[in-house]
Amino acid sequence: MAAMLESNVSESQVEQLERWIKAGNTPQSIALRSLIILEAHRGQSAQAIGKSLKVSQPTIRLWKRRFMEGGPQALTTIAPGRGRKPKMSRQKVTAVVRATQHTTPPGQTQWSCRTMAKAKGLSFKTVQRIWNLHGLKPHQQRTFKLSRDKRFVEKLTDVVGVYLNPPDKAVVLCVDEKSQIQALDRTQPGLPLKPGRCGTQTHDYVRHGTTTLFAALNVLDGKVIGQCLPRHRHQEFLKFLRTVDAEFPPTLELHLILDNYGTHKHPKVQQWLGKRPRFKLHFTPTSASWTNLVERWFRELTEKAIRRGAFVSVADLKAAIHAFLANYNDEAKPFVWTASAETIMAKLQRVKAIYDTLH
């Protein structure tokens, strides 16, 4: 059988077995079976394999035969009647899953492992295993909202079209403002990072004022034009537009992706844009800020420069924002949009179908 196995193992099967052996998450039983087959393929006798791997001869013969009958996948399957017998019925598992999805404990908003275990007469470890098996995480929640914009499809198609097929001899800029950025100073210095302990900061703070950051993300190279201003009215937006206008040669068209904030549609803003036809505006759908890539850059700014910072004044906050902006632009990389409008619409239709059945 060893000679037959040596000739019947293909190169792709050898590579598969070697990947299983090297992978850290491969069950030890499967890794051992793979080693048996590889050693036999390399010409080792059954006695030598049994001695080196400390397995019996019947075990070696069993997995050689299984491999010859079913290939590598046969090493991962458990024969009927073998293995640990389940201690819980399918009905019990189904009851836990349904209760997790469709009910809540009295006076609470979601189940925990222990409350579910108490309600169903199980151990909390058993509930954990059931939830992990079915991908249930009742302790987690994400924000979500369906856009009610009547022109949703039109706006989405327009914005996504600019991302995927940008116009020639033009610059595409994602523009928005991050308003009311607070200059927060902690009431005490935090403890430094050390082995076995993360850095700390106090839960309370002193508020020294706010600023608003106007930003324009260049979709082509990922660089950001930023300007901190005290408020976010149409006057400040016009000032920022003048800054953007001065950054690029007058021969280039500027395609701006914006949300539907009233400042962006103010009559004085429209009047200023009417005198500069190279500005082309593309508005995102209402309640769909995720279609504006500059929001992704705002997340970078928040997580890496603001959230853990301590600022003694608004000027200190502005200095930190400008420092992050300068360093970011030195090694800027673009955020690449890949989803088509059709793919997004198909996903939204599936979500709407589920939403309609619930409400």
Image: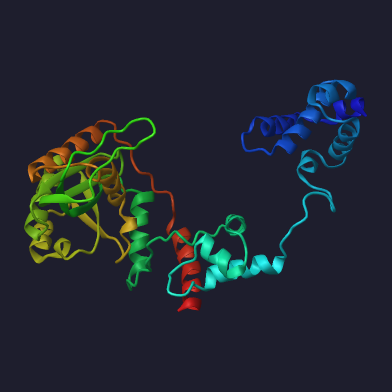
Q: Is residue 55 above or below residue 211?
A: above
Q: Quadrant of the C terminus?
A: bottom left
* Left or right of 16 on screen, residue 242: left
Number of labelled discs?
0
Q: Is residue 18 above or below residue 131?
A: above
Please provide percent x and percent y for residue 49.
Answer: 84, 24
Q: Closer to the camera, 151 or 107? A: 107
Please provide percent x and percent y for residue 313.
Answer: 8, 44
Q: Quadrant of the N terminus?
A: top right
**Colour mapping:** rainbow
Q: Is residue 353 visible?
A: yes
Task: Choose top left, top right, bottom left or bottom right for residue 128.
Answer: bottom right
Task: Choose top left, top right, bottom left or bottom right for residue 250.
Answer: top left
Q: Closer to the camera, 294 or 22? A: 22
The residue shown at (80%, 29%) is: 36
Q: Is residue 131 visible?
A: no
The residue shown at (33%, 62%) is: 288
The residue shown at (89%, 25%) is: 46
The residue shown at (56%, 66%) is: 118
Please provide percent x and percent y for residue 210.
Answer: 11, 52
Please provide percent x and percent y for residue 224.
Answer: 23, 41
* Left or right of 160 on screen, residue 50: right
